[in-house]
């Protein structure tokens, strides 16, 4: 696949097609590490941060809903 850059304000943007995003399980909130070997871009999704955030969000939800009960059980 050959792509060209698109103007985005004063920057350049690369549009990634939806099927590629779906294949790699990437969405607009997935952090991406961008590095280069001097000739090529290497773009790698960072899934661990997303998984940690999902876990943290779920934990907060459970604590909010059942925090009092959990504290009583811990005593």
Image: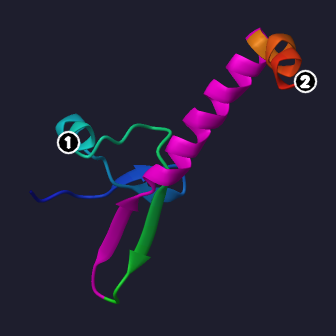
Q: Main secondary structure of the magenta part?
A: helix
Residue 39: % across, % down: 28, 86
Residue at 34% from the left image edge and 87% from the top image edge: 37
What range of the chain is rendered magenta?
39-65
Q: Which mark is residue 75?
A: 2
Residue placed furthest toward the bottom = 38
Secondary element type, mark 2: loop
Question: Is residue 45 within the magenta segment?
Answer: yes
Q: Residues within 10 Å of mark 1 (few under 14, many from 20)?
A: few
Q: Is residue 41 above or below residue 29?
A: below
Residue at 90% from the left image edge and 24% from the top image edge: 75
Residue at 22% from the left image edge and 41% from the top image edge: 17
Q: Quadrant of residue 43?
A: bottom left
As rendered, which of 21 and 73 lies closer to the eye?
Answer: 73
Q: Which residue is mark 1?
A: 23
Left or right of residue 28, residue 72 in this image: right
Residues marked 1 and 2 touching at CB (< 8 Å): no
Residue at 87% from the left image edge and 21% from the top image edge: 71
Q: Depth-wise, is mark 1 or mark 2 nearer the camera?
A: 2
Residue placed furthest toward the left = 1
Residues at marks 1 and 2, CA–CA distance in whole angstroms: 47 Å
Quadrant where the N terminus sits is bottom left
Residue 27: % across, % down: 39, 37
């Amino acid at each position: 696949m050959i792509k060209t850059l698109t103007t985005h304000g004063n920057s350049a943007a690369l549009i990634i097609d939806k099927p590629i995003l779906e294949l790699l399980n990437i969405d607009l909130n997935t952090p991406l590490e961008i590095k280069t070997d001097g000739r090529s871009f290497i773009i790698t999704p960072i899934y661990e941060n997303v998984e940690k955030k999902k876990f943290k969000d779920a934990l907060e939800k459970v604590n909010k809903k059942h925090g009092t009960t959990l504290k009583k059980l811990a005593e």
